[in-house]
Amino acid sequence: MDHLLNVTTALSILLLLMVLFSVRRAHIRVEYSVSWLAASVAMLVLSRSRPVLDLITRWTGVPDTPLTLFLISGAVFLIMFFRFSVIISHLRDDNVALAQRVAILEYRLHSLESHEK
């Protein structure tokens, strides 16, 4: 179990550093990095505080502590992926609306040019 917690700690720190470097180099926007930072810090805290993890295991009734850690990790990342799917859907809708507005403006511009000739 301790080896698993050490691996989880290392992966959490790696994720944390990747997000911080990505924000610093402007590869990811700050508002999107907050979710990733929160997830990596949550996993880091859970992997370093065995009593909290044991308490959650007893509270949820999951038979094994490593399974609890992976269930929490999976749930956190599923929530994040859902959040980003919603954001991507909104961006796609905005892109369609913007393309339609540009097409209307181009049509009006061409109409004005053809009336001037």
Image (spheres, rainbow, N blue to C red):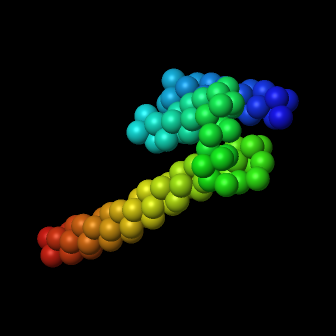
Q: Which residue is drawn at 62% across and 40% down?
A: 55
**Horizontal relation, residue 31 to residue 8: left or right:** left
**Horizontal relation, residue 50 to residue 88: left or right:** right
Q: In this view, does 107 lie above or below 76?
A: below
Q: Which of 73 and 14 is in front in this view?
A: 73
**Horizontal relation, residue 89 to residue 47: left or right:** left
Quarter of the rendering occupied by the C terminus? bottom left
**What residue occupies the far left of the structure in this picture?**
116
On the image, the x and y values in percent for residue 30 come to 43, 34
Q: Is residue 1 above or below residue 100?
A: above
Q: Is residue 107 visible?
A: yes
Q: Nearer the viewer, residue 12 or 17?
A: 12
Q: Is residue 79 above or below residue 5?
A: below
On the image, the x and y values in percent for residue 96 come to 39, 68
Quarter occupied by residue 19:
top right
Q: Can residue 77 be seen in this view?
A: no
Q: Which of 22 and 50 is in front in this view?
A: 50
Quarter occupied by residue 105:
bottom left
Q: Residue at x 33, y 68 (%)?
A: 97
Quarter occupied by residue 42:
top right
Q: Which of 81 and 103 is in front in this view?
A: 81
On the image, the x and y values in percent for residue 33 come to 49, 37
**Horizontal relation, residue 111 to residue 99: left or right:** left
Q: Which residue is drawn at 71% across and 54% down?
A: 62
Q: Residue at x 46, y 36 (%)?
A: 34
Quarter of the rendering occupied by the N terminus? top right
